[in-house]
Structures are given as structure tokens and as C-alpha cells.
Image (cartoon, helix red, strand yellow):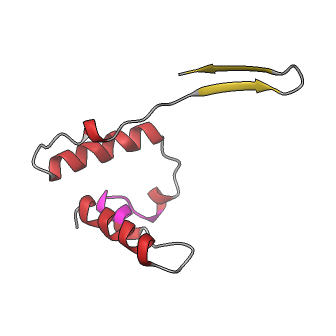
Amino acid sequence: MSQVYQLQLLFGRMEVGEAGSVETKGLTRSFGWDDADAFMQQDAQEMHKVLVERLEEESGGERVRESLFGECVNWLECEEAKYRSSRT
């Protein structure tokens, strides 16, 4: 099954389901990952890159990238010195 279809199923289950969690094996397997891969820590930026590439492939080359954006802010705060530093 495609990643797009599995994402639709996942979000649909989260929206209408009454359980506190939903099964993600379908989505995991759609990426070609097995159970062991599911427990490996993934880099969020790399996962985003892979997901966007797959979504663009499945949408026939439609530019998905422009629709998915965000901002990353790194910050450090020292409560005792009342100091905060951030970088976007």
C-alpha cells in the first residue's frame, strides 16, 4: 500500500477513533521498514525529506514541498541568570 493511503488511514483512525492510540504498522511497512526498524531512532529532518519525496512521487510530481514548511528554533535558557539565547 502507498504511503499516502496509509497516512490517510492513520489520520482517519486518529480523528474518529476513541482509543488513546492507533496502530502504525501499515504506515511503517509502506516505507519498507520492518518491526526492528520501527524501534530505531529516526532523524526528524531525514524522515521529513523521505516522506516529502515519496508524497511527490505518488502525486505525479506535484510540488508537496511548498505546502509543508516550518521553522526550527534552538534555544538555551538559564533560569538562575535569567538569560535566554535563541537561534532560528
* Point 26% across, 38% down: residue: 65
* Point 57% across, 74% down: residue: 20
In the displayed image of the protein, which residue is found farthest to the left? 60
* Point 36% across, 36% down: residue: 69
Instruction: Tell which of 81 and 36 is nearer to you.
Output: 81
Identify whether 31 is placed above or below 5.
Answer: above
Taking the image as shown, residue 60 lies to the left or right of residue 22, namely: left
How many numbered badges does the structure rendering display? 0
Q: Position of residue 21 (x, y in %)?
A: 53, 72
Which image quadrant is residue 1 in? Answer: bottom left
Q: Position of residue 32 (x, y in %)?
A: 31, 58
Taking the image as shown, residue 38 lies to the left or right of residue 28, namely: right
Q: Is residue 36 magenta?
A: no
Identify whether 66 is placed above or below 79.
Answer: below
Q: Position of residue 27 (x, y in %)?
A: 35, 64
* Point 24% across, 42% down: residue: 53
Q: Is residue 30 magenta?
A: yes
Q: Which segment did they paint magenta?
A: 27-35
In the displayed image of the protein, which residue is found farthest to the right? 80
Q: Position of residue 77 (x, y in %)?
A: 76, 26
Instruction: Tell which of 48 and 19 is nearer to you.
Output: 19
Which image quadrant is residue 66 in? Answer: top left
Identify whether 1 is placed above or below 82.
Answer: below
Taking the image as shown, residue 59 lies to the left or right of residue 35, namely: left
Instruction: Tell which of 47 and 72 is nearer to you.
Output: 72
